[in-house]
């Protein structure tokens, strides 16, 4: 799937510097003058009452242009049905002004927000976005990275399953800037933008322990998914900080994927293995959604009989009945900052945002 992130006044992106630059008209309308001559940036500059250099900045560095001037040039382009020839411009500059994105699971609203942030940052800088979802598969991730390399993208933003993969090394060998999404790079070879997963889960544990919970179920995916291991570690650290033994308090239930559907049968197993639990912490809100549904089917009231906590603060979390207590991560902000790093280049940066506990109605004191 291709997600086009681009300025609203163009069907592509590019820079126009001379009359000889080739521009093709859109499917409807025309980008020719009344005499039949193709329009150039000089014509747009004349129509907008600005210099040709200003038009070039609008196309390539819009952040340098005053809002009123930017709007005037946009209006002139719309009126002329002016469309930029992206291919010609890419050949001239030797770069594509395209970012490739590998999300972990596009069915999860969290990743929808991440890619929305990426798209917004890319659009303001005249970049397009190629978007793919690995579906938590190493093979699919490798295929997507190969495709992006073949398309000669300028940068790749990837929620990588395997930091040691050959596919990531190949990007480095081809000088394609790589930014890791939602995880850190211990080697600091690549830039990364993530949240403090351990701190978020620790907040949950300390909150539950303070409310008197002494048996906590944890529904998550295998720990080879990096954030699952980190959230497990944070949960156990938070329990231990309350003077309790994590081995006695925490019971983990591992499910195959981070979906509501896989979470539903986990409820029966968890209640059978740990019948005395008073709270369930889910590794993300989609899992919590499945757990909540199954508890309702079984006649288990939340929070009356069992408290429930999620992680991510997806859009639906506050709409549930009861509203879901969860950890907010701000994925839009993560995506936006990651795209900025991919576009600007430079020395690798490790950006870590702090999470926030969103207390709602799904937890009660014991």
Image: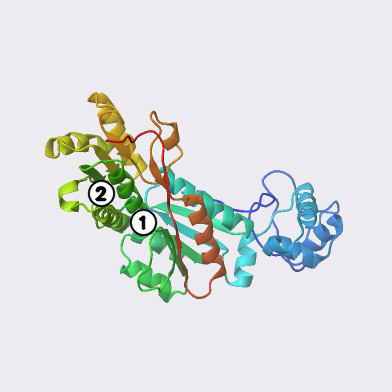
Residue in the image at 67% along x and 45% along y: 27
Q: Measured along the vertical axis of the image, is residue 81 above or below residue 187?
A: above
Q: Give the number of the mark in front: 2 or 1.
A: 1
Q: Earlier in the sequence, mark 2 or mark 1?
A: 1
Q: Residue 141 occupies which quadrant of the picture?
A: bottom left
Residue 7: x and y in percent read 65, 53
Between 103 and 222, the one lying in front of the other is: 222
Q: Nearer the viewer, residue 174 or 114?
A: 114
Instruction: Inspect this view and state whether residue 151 appears.
Output: no
Mark 2: few/some/many CA within 10 Å (<14, 14-19, 20+): many
Disc 1 crowd rating (10 Å Cα; few below 14, some 14-19, many 20+) is many
The relative height of residue 238 versus residue 253 in the rendered view (above or below) is below
| Residue found 30% across the figure and 55% down from its top | 234
Position of the C terminus by quadrant: top left
Identified at 46% across, 63% down, the residue is: 156
As helix, strand or loop, the secondary structure at mark 2 comes to loop
Determine which of the numbered discs, if any, sits on residue 199 in the image.
Answer: 1
Question: Eyeballing the image, is 182 above or below 269?
Answer: below
- Percent x, y for residue 48? 84, 56
Residue 217, percent from left and from top: 22, 42
Q: Residue at x 63, y 55 (%)?
A: 12
In the rendered view, does 84 fall on the left or right side of 157?
Answer: right
Residue 212 falls left or right of residue 38:
left
Disc 1 element:
helix
Locate residue 8, reporting x and y percent: 66, 49
Closest to the observer, 248 or 195: 248
Pointer 2: what residue? Answer: 221
State if disc 1 and disc 2 touch (CB < 8 Å).
no
Residue 213 in view of the camera: yes
Most foreground residue, 101 or 44:
101
Question: For the residues marked 2 and 1, what is the alpha-carbon distance in whole angstroms?
Answer: 19 Å
């Amino acid at each position: 799937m291709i997600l086009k992130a681009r300025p609203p006044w163009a069907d592509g992106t590019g820079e126009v510097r001379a009359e000889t630059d080739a521009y093709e008209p859109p499917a409807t309308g025309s980008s020719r003058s009344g005499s039949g001559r193709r329009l150039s940036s000089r014509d747009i500059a004349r129509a907008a009452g600005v210099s040709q250099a200003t038009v070039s900045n609008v196309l390539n560095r819009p952040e340098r242009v005053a809002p009123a001037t930017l709007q005037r040039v946009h209006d002139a382009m719309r009126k002329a049905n002016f469309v930029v020839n992206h291919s010609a411009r890419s050949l001239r500059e030797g770069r594509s002004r395209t970012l490739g994105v590998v999300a972990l699971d596009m069915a999860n609203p969290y990743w929808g927000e991440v890619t929305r942030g990426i798209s917004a940052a890319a659009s303001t800088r005249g970049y397009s976005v190629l978007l793919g979802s690995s579906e938590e598969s190493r093979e699919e991730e490798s295929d997507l990275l190969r495709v992006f390399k073949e398309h000669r993208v300028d940068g790749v933003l990837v929620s990588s399953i395997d930091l040691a993969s050959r596919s990531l090394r190949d990007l480095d060998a081809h000088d394609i800037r790589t930014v890791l999404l939602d995880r850190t790079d211990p080697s600091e070879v690549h830039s990364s933008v993530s949240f403090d997963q351990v701190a978020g889960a620790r907040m949950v544990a300390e909150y539950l322990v303070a409310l008197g919970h002494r048996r906590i179920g944890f529904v998550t995916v295998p720990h080879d998914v990096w954030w699952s291991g980190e959230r497990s570690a944070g949960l156990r650290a938070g329990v231990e900080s309350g003077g309790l033994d994590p081995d006695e308090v925490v019971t983990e239930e591992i499910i195959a994927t981070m979906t509501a559907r896989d979470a539903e049968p986990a409820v029966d197993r968890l209640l059978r293995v740990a019948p005395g639990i008073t709270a369930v912490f889910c590794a993300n809100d989609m899992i919590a959604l499945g757990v909540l549904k199954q508890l309702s089917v079984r006649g288990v009231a939340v929070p009356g009989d069992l408290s429930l906590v999620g992680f991510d603060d997806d859009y639906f979390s506050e709409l549930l009945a009861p509203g879901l207590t969860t950890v907010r991560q701000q994925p839009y902000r993560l995506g936006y900052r990651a795209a900025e790093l991919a576009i600007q280049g430079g020395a690798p940066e490790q950006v870590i945002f702090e999470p926030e506990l969103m207390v709602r109605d799904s937890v009660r004191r014991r």
